Image (cartoon, rainbow, N blue to C red):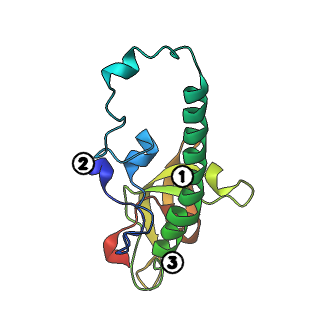
């Protein structure tokens, strides 16, 4: 059930898209739905068993769903991280020790930014977080908070 919690905006309008969940990342669908329709006995003895048309249709459908998912991921979830992060350095300290963050890279595309773990926070004279010591796969470094994007959107930060 934890992987079915929404990570994007939940609309009150039933005609809107369902919100993205961690289960979409793992399985391509919410876990509370069944993966397959029931199979009748007649289908098991179908003489067109060797026909790959249905498999090709299914592959096309899954490819389309995957493309739609990534478009939504880039257009909904990642900007939500930015909106949540904009509060950092103003009135709220959005980044905390132990947070997993995306590290902005001015050269790489956003989907290729590296992951890091926040190990220490550096505060300014106004007692707000200004930079963080982080650990990446390449080692330890320091980055300003405006280059770090927490991977969880906290409900208390909106």
* Numbered disc in front, either 2 or 3: 2
Residue 62 location (% of width, % of height): 55, 39
Alpha-carbon distance for marks 2 and 3? 30 Å
The residue depicted at 32 percent of the width and 48 percent of the height is 3
Identify the element where label 2 is drawn.
loop
In the visual, does 156 lie left or right of 59? Answer: left
Residue 135 location (% of width, % of height): 50, 48
Alpha-carbon distance for marks 2 and 1? 20 Å
Residue 69 badge: 1
* Residue closest to the far right: 107
Residue named by callout 2 = 1
First in residue order: circle 2 vs circle 1: 2
In the visual, does 52 lie left or right of 118? Answer: right
Residue 107, quarter of picture: bottom right
86 and 74: which one is in front? 74
Alpha-carbon distance for marks 1 and 3? 25 Å
Identify the element where label 3 is drawn.
loop
Depicted 86 relative to depicted 116: above or below: below
150 and 135: which one is in front? 150
In the visual, does 117 lie left or right of 154? Answer: right
Residue 86 badge: 3
């Amino acid at each position: 059930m934890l992987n079915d919690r929404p990570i994007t905006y939940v609309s009150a309008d039933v005609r809107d898209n369902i919100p993205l969940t961690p289960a979409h990342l793992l399985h391509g669908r919410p876990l509370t739905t069944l993966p397959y329709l029931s199979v009748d006995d007649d289908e098991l003895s179908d003489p067109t068993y060797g026909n790959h048309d249905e498999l090709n249709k299914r592959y096309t459908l899954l490819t389309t769903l995957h493309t739609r998912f990534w478009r939504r991921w880039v257009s909904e979830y990642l900007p939500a991280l930015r909106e949540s992060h904009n509060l950092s350095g103003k009135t709220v300290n959005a980044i905390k020790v132990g947070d997993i963050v995306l590290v902005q890279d001015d050269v790489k595309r956003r989907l290729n930014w590296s992951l890091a773990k926040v190990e220490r926070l550096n505060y300014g004279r106004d007692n707000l977080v200004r930079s963080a010591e982080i650990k990446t796969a390449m080692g330890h470094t320091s980055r300003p908070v405006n280059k770090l994007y927490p991977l969880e959107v906290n409900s208390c930060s909106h």
